[in-house]
Amino acid sequence: MGNRNYLPALVFISLCIIWGSTWIFIKLGLQDAPPFLSAGMRFVVATLILFPLLKWRDLKIPREWKVLSIMLYTGIFAISVSYGLVYWSEQFIPAGLTAVLFSTMPFFVIILSHFMLSDDPLTINKIAGSVLGFSGVIVIFIDSLKIENPMAVWGTVGVVFASFCSAVSDVIIKKHSRSLHPIVLTTVQMFCGAVILFLLGVLFEDFQDFRITWRSVGSIVYLAVMGTSIAFIGFYWLIRQIRVSTASLLVFVIPIVALFLDWLIFGEVLNFRVWIGSFMVLGGIGIAVS
């Protein structure tokens, strides 16, 4: 029983590592593939992985419209809109700025949770912890906050709206979590993402811009398996175990993990601000959950 108490923390840390690595793979993939086709292929592959998993686990997609509609709506918000905007926006703004802007998500979550969830009220600790954590992310990426490309303004708006859509989806899922199996929910959501994003790619992008290289294929496979299938099942399980406002705090840690992976894999230098900002993020999480 004691080991099970540590399982949510273990899943939280694992998700930080997995999703921290996805920013690198998204950037790699966009070098050889347009955003909507790249994102669409990611979720197509994830769907092809998840449907056999449903069959193997003998899980059924519910036919009741009330339950199915929640899965479809959150799939559109969390996957089609949110990921579509992040992929599109990363063409115009640096990855660091994307990380900072997406880190607004916990603020949306704690506000929405206060009004939509009876057991997750707004508290001083949550506000203070979120502000400190967000400030830490800004300290780390302060050099990336310049906007030079005229389209970067729209990229900035796109990421903030993507953050809001993810927050809405997470709070709705928490509200109905007992009736949503994580694997079934993930499968339906990935199917939504696959259909809508791939359709956007077909309508607005050129297949000739999709080059089959080790970067594009490797990016899609890694993001589909680790960053989508495994990570989302883990996250939706986590939401059932802890408050969604607590689970959302992993967004602060993800960019830090991305930086440390850059250092580990590519030898990028970690300056003093990274260490200061990282301690601020960890301190913010500690305050928010206390």
Image (cartoon, grey):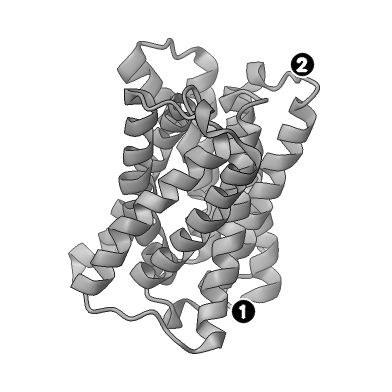
Q: How many marks overall?
A: 2
- Residue lying furthest bottom: 64
Residue 2, given in percent of the width and then of the height, sits at 20, 66
Q: Residue at x 36, y 53 (%)?
A: 46
Q: Which mark is residue 19?
A: none
Q: Which is more foreground, mark 1 or mark 2?
A: 2
Q: Residue at x 49, y 89 (%)?
A: 64
Label 2 crowding class (10 Å Cα cut-off): few <14, some 14-19, many 20+? few
Residue 178, given in percent of the width and then of the height, sits at 43, 81
Q: Quadrant of residue 79?
A: bottom right
Q: In front here: 159 or 68?
A: 68
Q: CA distance from mark 1 to mark 2?
A: 44 Å
Q: Earlier in the sequence, mark 1 or mark 2?
A: 1
Q: Do the residues under discs 1 and 2 have CB atoms within 8 angstroms?
A: no
Label 1 crowding class (10 Å Cα cut-off): few <14, some 14-19, many 20+? few
Q: Residue at x 79, y 30 (%)?
A: 153
**Residue 124 seen in render:** no
Work out whether 192 lies above or below 164.
below
Q: Which residue is mark 2?
A: 148
Q: Which residue is mark 1?
A: 118
Work out whether 36 lies above or below 186.
above
| Residue type pointed to by label 1 | Ser
